[in-house]
Image (cartoon, rainbow, N blue to C red):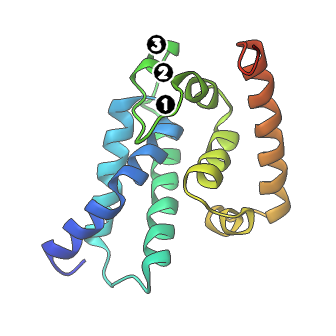
């Protein structure tokens, strides 16, 4: 990024989205905060401008996913977060904390496609492009994620009168 104003604008437009994505993947607040800050540090070090707003957002999503993946694979990461960390999840507009707890309990690939599809508005084709996956793989994960989420919600008594 060339100027502080450009970086401040990028941060203002996309921090919540990047942070939420990191939180979905890392499942704890401190690690999500670290990953999100690293993403914006990398944006600051990026040599050229983004082509357009879609490229900007896609670059941030892919960079956030890669940073979280790297942190989760790192040798020093020996601790695992328990279920109590779910109480600390912070969302921009949570409609029901219980639903978010169930989403956060899904396997990482399912959490990621649900978040990108339902909360960021990406189509399965766009998600496939962002993640470097086959569109049919993304659709399959989305179907599996919906089924797993439905079962988890039914077990918790959601939708029952």
Q: Nearer the viewer, residue 76 or 23?
A: 23
* Side of 86 where 154 appears, left or right: right
Q: Of callouts 2 and 1, which one flags the residue occurring earlier in the amino acid sequence?
A: 1
User: Horizontal and vertical percent for residue 37?
Assistant: 29, 50
At horizontal 71% and vertical 19% (from top left) the residue drawn is: 158
Q: Secondary structure at mark 1?
A: loop
Q: Which residue is mark 1?
A: 27
- Counting the numbered discs, the total is 3
Q: Which residue is mark 2?
A: 86
Q: Are marks 3 and 2 in contact (CB under 8 Å)?
A: yes
Label 2 – label 1 distance at C-alpha: 7 Å
Residue 97 vertical position relative to residue 37 in the rendered view, above or below: above
Q: Is residue 113 among the parts visible in the rendering?
A: yes
- Residue 84's disc is 3
* Side of 62 where 154 appears, left or right: right
Q: Secondary structure at mark 3?
A: helix
Quarter of the image holding residue 106? top right
Label 1 – label 3 distance at C-alpha: 10 Å
User: Horizontal and vertical percent for residue 130?
Assistant: 61, 66
């Amino acid at each position: 990024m060339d100027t502080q104003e450009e970086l401040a604008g990028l941060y203002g437009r996309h921090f919540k989205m990047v942070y939420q994505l990191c939180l979905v993947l890392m499942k704890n607040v401190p690690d999500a905060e670290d990953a999100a800050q690293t993403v914006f540090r990398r944006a600051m070090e990026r040599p050229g401008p983004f082509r357009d707003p879609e490229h900007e957002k896609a670059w941030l999503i892919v960079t956030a996913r890669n940073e979280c993946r790297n942190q989760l694979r790192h040798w020093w990461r020996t601790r695992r977060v328990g279920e109590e960390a779910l109480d600390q999840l912070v969302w921009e507009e949570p409609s029901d904390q219980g639903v978010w707890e169930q989403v956060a309990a899904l396997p990482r690939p399912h959490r990621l496609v649900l978040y990108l599809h339902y909360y960021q508005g990406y189509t399965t084709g766009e998600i496939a492009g962002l993640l470097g996956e086959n569109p049919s793989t993304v659709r399959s994960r989305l179907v599996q994620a919906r089924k797993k989420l439905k079962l988890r919600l039914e077990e918790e008594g959601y939708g029952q009168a």
